[in-house]
Image (cartoon, rainbow, N blue to C red):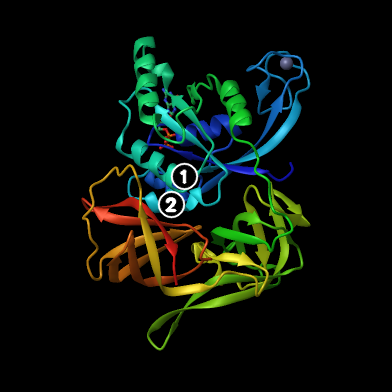
Amino acid sequence: MVQSELNIMTAGHVDHGKTTLTHALTGKWTDTHSEEVKRGITIKLGYADTAVYKCPKCPEPEAFTNSKKCGKCGGQAELQRMISFVDAPGHETLMATVIAASSIVDGALFVIAASEKCPQAQTAEHLAVLETVGIRNVVVAQNKVDLVTKERALESLKEIRALLKGTLYENAPVIPVAANSRINVDALLQAIQENIPTPKRNLDAAPRLYVARSFDVNKPGAAVEKILGGVVGGSLLQGKLRAGEELELLPGMLRHKKGQDVYEPVKTKIASLNAGAESVPEAGPGGLIGIATLLDPSLTKADSLVGCVAGRPGTLPPVWKDFSVEVFPIARQVQKFPETFIQNEPLVLGAGTATTVGFVASAKKKKNFILSLQLKKPICADKATPLAVMRRSQNRWHLYGTAKIVS
Ligand code: GDP
Ligand code: ZN
């Protein structure tokens, strides 16, 4: 296996079949963490890689497959590219995680079940997220067509087209599929190949990785001399990482000092790199990159470093504990929000894979609101990094808009 060259996220309402469809496309289940299985929902970003092959002899769409051997003629299919699917959770409280996923992907597979009226609450909200964060290339999977009549399938298609009208995805392909019986998976692969191109990467830029998970890979009771260093995983936006290089992670590690929570930068070395489930000497953008470090594994366990930005020491964006931002509400609000912000109102901010709470210290209205925010947890971000802003409405967090750091 080689490294994936792009990431595609799945989005859509809970239970519409994102995880099942990811399995149909890749042959892998993304939600294998015990806690997720227990709760029956995907709560973290899951990656699943697949190779896309095309048979040179068979007609489209049957020619597209995720196996080396053509399913139709049994001949040798040709490798097109490696794709990593990032399965975003559909659970209603986890909009922040959907936003985190959107920061590391190059396109989206938007899953809508034909068996329910469209749009469901999160269908509309995820669509707003995709548009707001600027994802340009989307393929819609109209799932569960095995459960409905032909009439309902056509009605569902009308509802989907109506939902997409006027959005960036007005002309996105809608592919009818049945994820658990793998119906039309070939046509879906073809649509992905044709509509979600691999973007041009800047491989010479300073590497910048968004950390999506971090863990301790050692078994309890492992012999001291066999203990491996802490592992962090995530996706590179630009540049390359190489084994043996120095690595810095910001804002870093939470420490308790004199009753205060402080985040301290973490510096370490890349002991080894993994991409596409293989050890590699260097890795670039696309897919999940696992970095084995020289850190004490207790420092990386239980996703402690998720949300950090990693790269060469001295090249990372600044770390902010407070800042002023200009806020841009989304055009198509799914929720109703108050027109003004009140002192100390908490907002949830997403920047890359980081999520933090910002309390409104002051609000000035110019063309847009300029908010001065105090952050509960600092974030590492450039002024150019788009921030996602969530506000509370009806006891839940909803996407409100985006923000840009002013100072
Ligand atoms: P997610 O929450 O969007 O990830 O949805 P899941 O992939 O967990 O699917 C939710 C339920 O729908 C599971 O019980 C699946 O087996 C079922 N399901 C998913 N896709 C299909 C489909 O195409 N047809 C049918 N009949 N059931 C499906
Ligand atoms: Zn063939």
- The circle on residue 372 is none
Q: Quadrant of residue 244?
A: bottom right
Q: Nearer the viewer, residue 382 or 113?
A: 382
- The circle on residue 88 is 1
**Seen in the image, is 397 located left or right of residue 207?**
left
- On whether ligand 1 comes within 8 Å of the CB at mark 1, the answer is no
**Seen in the image, is 92 located left or right of residue 395?**
right
Callout 2 amino acid: Thr
Q: Residue at x 57, y 69 (%)?
A: 317
Which residue does the numbered mark 2 point to in the structure image?
Answer: 97
Q: Looking at the image, in which quadrant does ligand 1 appear? A: top left
- Where residue 113 appears, x then y in whole percent? 39, 27
Q: Dots 1 and 2: beta carbons under 8 Å?
A: yes
Q: Farthest residue in the front direction?
A: 367
Q: Nearer the viewer, residue 111 or 402?
A: 402
Q: Residue at x 37, y 85 (%)?
A: 259
Q: Farthest residue in the bottom direction?
A: 258
- Where residue 187 appears, x then y in whole percent? 58, 21
Q: Residue at x 49, y 46 (%)?
A: 134
Is any part of residue 218 visible from this angle? no
Please tell me which of labels 1 and 2 falls first in the chain: 1
